[in-house]
């Protein structure tokens, strides 16, 4: 038997274990994962968690489920299975992050157990070691500790379940003669069972796609597993998997389209030629492989390498070509494992390698959460090699096999150490961005986000320091200047704030936010002359023209209300509510305007609608009681 991770369908498993051990090992791995991540349940909210969870209006009422599934533009990304689970979690936990983190940890534990089960079905002797590495590798921390990355965890869970459902069917289809072996009286029931099993797999596969479309590679991955396991792919296997691969590809294409049109992954940051994209992909692959093999340091935003074809890109391409040549040579000699593992890694990670426009590539071409599932391929290579080395060492030295596994245990202990060193960085936004900047001091996006977190915590002087530092970079400078103006205004430096807002507008005139902030700055003056209010109104209207923008509409509504222009105020608050459906402030102010306009019926209906979404909102309850009293007086 060759010392590789290749296998044959008619061979015995590489590791002979007792039935009890074999059945309990996935549960053991899941338990280890839960214990390792116990402290993660005390973490808080970080980047994007507001849009995904606690400020997401779709999670607040039952009708949000319709929007989640049938109105793709209303969600940050069209992953309806993820947002449906978040909807359930929101009904259970509300704004309490502990519950969401607990779900993430449990899903990660389930995925680690599924990894062991699947690899055992493929007869890998190192299955439990690979499962433990998947559970404990520090590159997985970003996914498990980040509530918004529920999409990674849920999609991997459905990926694994689908694999287990379909694998027995694929095993029956190695040759046409398999079906002929069934007795005639059993053929009908057997065909029915196969059809039901296949349809169940189609359902779980669709749930995987609706969680994250990178799972579109599942049919290709299963065909690769068939080739690895038996050395060939039958016509039946190919015939059933190729249409499913086409379906997955169509769903993936739609996600890429939404990434461009809805998320905004278009423009100069993605205008690369195919040669440059190949260089980006090669550097991404080398980065992920090196992180998997030697996880010394994890960063939320890794330094963004130069996408031009420099020496680093050519070197990465050469390394990738050498790696491909080596695994092809192994496969030619009958050792299919290395090729299968590398192909799984590259194929699963393909959507994040730079060939498709992905919005986070604005900040960095690599991110740990991009390879939550693909990393299994590299771990199979690494840990099968370590496992075989340990067995060979025990055989040569005549030592205890348990003792020969000690180096593997020490490597896992190193994973746990790195995991617990990285995990506290996800406690909140401030700890996350401070850690990022300590390792990647030139990340402008991290500077901007840290300044925002400081501002929200009223640490204005620290926010000002980071914004002034970010102002030395060209990356999104118009946003830096807008934030700089806001902080200066909050600190009382009105002239400095105005100068920053005007500089931001000069860089990007179609950005509505600095126009709104100029209006707010103008209104904040003690000058009560009508010209001051008119100037502020002009700024807000300009923001609406270049937007349209929620803040502009809300500010115009507020200004009109203060001036007694109730009809105009109601129109602008209605515009604000249209820009942010189900927004509490816009809806409440609109209800108040309707009440003041002697329209208690419309106002009460809107107040009741608000209380369905925000049942604890005291001002709305008070307004509704007053409206009901008025309607009672006015009624017959």
Image (spheres, rainbow, N blue to C red):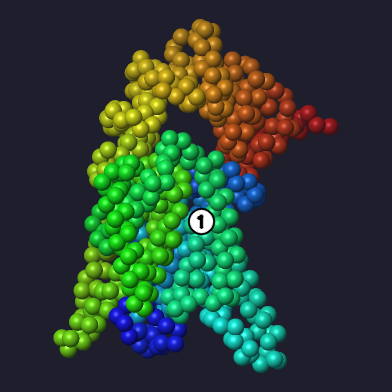
- In screen coordinates, is 566 left or right of 257? right
Res 433 seen here: no
Is residue 128 positioned above or below 552 on the image? below
Q: How many marks?
A: 1
Q: Quarter holding the C terminus?
A: top right
* Element class at badge 1: loop
Q: Position of residue 329 (x, y in %)?
A: 33, 71
Res 451 seen here: yes
Q: Position of residue 55 (x, y in %)?
A: 51, 43
Q: Which residue is found at the position 62% from the left and 42% from the top?
A: 611
- In screen coordinates, is 629 left or right of 524? right
Is residue 89 positioned above or below 5 on the image? above
Q: Which residue is mark 1?
A: 212
Q: Position of residue 220 (x, y in %)?
A: 50, 66
Based on the displayed image, in which of its 4 quarters is residue 297 positioned?
Answer: bottom left
Residue sticking out furthest to the left: 397
- In screen coordinates, is 448 left or right of 391? right
Q: Quarter holding the N terminus?
A: bottom left
Q: Position of residue 545 (x, y in %)?
A: 57, 22
């Amino acid at each position: 038997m060759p010392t590789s991770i290749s296998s044959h369908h008619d061979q015995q498993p590489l590791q002979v274990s007792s039935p009890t051990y074999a059945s309990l090992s996935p549960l053991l791995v899941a338990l280890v994962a839960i214990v390792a991540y116990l402290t993660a349940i005390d973490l808080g909210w970080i980047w994007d968690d507001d849009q995904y969870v606690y400020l997401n209006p779709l999670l607040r009422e039952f009708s949000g489920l319709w929007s989640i599934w049938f109105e793709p533009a209303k969600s940050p990304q069209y992953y309806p299975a993820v947002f449906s689970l978040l909807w359930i979690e929101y009904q259970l936990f509300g704004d309490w992050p502990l519950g969401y983190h607990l779900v993430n940890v449990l899903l990660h534990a389930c995925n680690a157990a599924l990894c062991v089960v699947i690899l055992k079905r493929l007869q890998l002797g190192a299955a439990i070691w690979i499962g433990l590495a998947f559970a404990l590798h520090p590159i997985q921390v970003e996914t498990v500790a980040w509530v918004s990355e529920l999409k990674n965890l849920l999609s991997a869970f459905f990926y694994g379940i689908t694999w287990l459902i379909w694998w027995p069917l694929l095993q029956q289809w190695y040759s046409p003669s398999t079906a002929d072996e069934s007795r005639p009286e059993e053929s009908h029931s057997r065909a029915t069972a196969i059809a039901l099993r296949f349809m169940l797999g189609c359902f779980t596969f669709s749930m995987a796609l609706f969680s994250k479309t990178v799972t579109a590679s599942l049919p290709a991955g299963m065909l690769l597993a068939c080739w690895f396991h038996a050395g060939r792919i039958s016509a039946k296997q190919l015939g059933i998997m190729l249409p499913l691969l086409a379906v997955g590809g169509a769903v993936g294409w739609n996600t890429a389209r939404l990434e461009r049109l809805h998320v905004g992954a278009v423009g100069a940051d993605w205008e690369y030629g195919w040669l440059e994209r190949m260089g980006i992909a090669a550097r991404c692959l080398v980065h992920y492989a090196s992180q998997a093999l030697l996880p010394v340091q994890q960063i939320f935003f890794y330094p963004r390498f130069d996408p031009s074809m420099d020496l680093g890109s050519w070197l990465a391409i050469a390394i990738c070509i050498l790696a491909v040549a080596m695994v092809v040579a192994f496969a030619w000699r009958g050792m299919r494992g290395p090729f299968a593992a590398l192909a799984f890694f590259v194929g699963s990670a393909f959507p994040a390698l730079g060939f498709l426009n992905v919005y986070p590539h604005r900040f960095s071409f690599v991110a740990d959460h991009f390879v939550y599932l693909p990393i299994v391929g590299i771990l199979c290579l690494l840990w099968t090699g370590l496992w075989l080395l340990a067995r060979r060492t025990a055989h040569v030295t005549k030592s205890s096999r348990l003792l020969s596994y000690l180096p593997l245990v020490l490597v896992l202990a190193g994973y746990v150490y790195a995991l617990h060193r990285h995990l506290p960085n996800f406690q909140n936004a401030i700890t996350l961005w401070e850690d990022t900047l300590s390792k990647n001091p030139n990340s402008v996006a991290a500077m901007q986000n840290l300044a925002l977190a400081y501002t929200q915590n009223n640490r204005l002087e620290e926010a000002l320091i980071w914004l002034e530092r970010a102002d030395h970079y060209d990356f999104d400078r118009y946003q830096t200047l807008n934030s700089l103006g806001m902080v200066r205004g909050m600190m009382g430096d009105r002239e400095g704030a105005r100068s920053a807002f005007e500089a931001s507008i000069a860089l990007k005139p179609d950005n509505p936010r600095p126009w709104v902030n100029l209006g707010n700055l103008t209104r904040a003056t003690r000058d009560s002359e009508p010209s001051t209010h008119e100037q502020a109104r002009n700024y807000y209207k300009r923001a609406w023209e270049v937007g349209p923008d929620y803040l502009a509409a809300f500010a115009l509504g507020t200004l009109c209300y203060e001036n007694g222009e109730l009809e105009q105020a109601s129109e602008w608050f209605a515009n604000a509510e249209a820009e942010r459906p189900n927004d509490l402030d816009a809806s409440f102010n609109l209800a108040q305007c309707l009440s003041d306009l002697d329209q208690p019926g419309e106002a009460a209906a809107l107040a009741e609608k608000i209380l369905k979404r925000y049942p604890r909102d005291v001002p709305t309850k008070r307004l509704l009681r007053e409206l009901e009293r008025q309607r009672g007086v006015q009624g017959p």
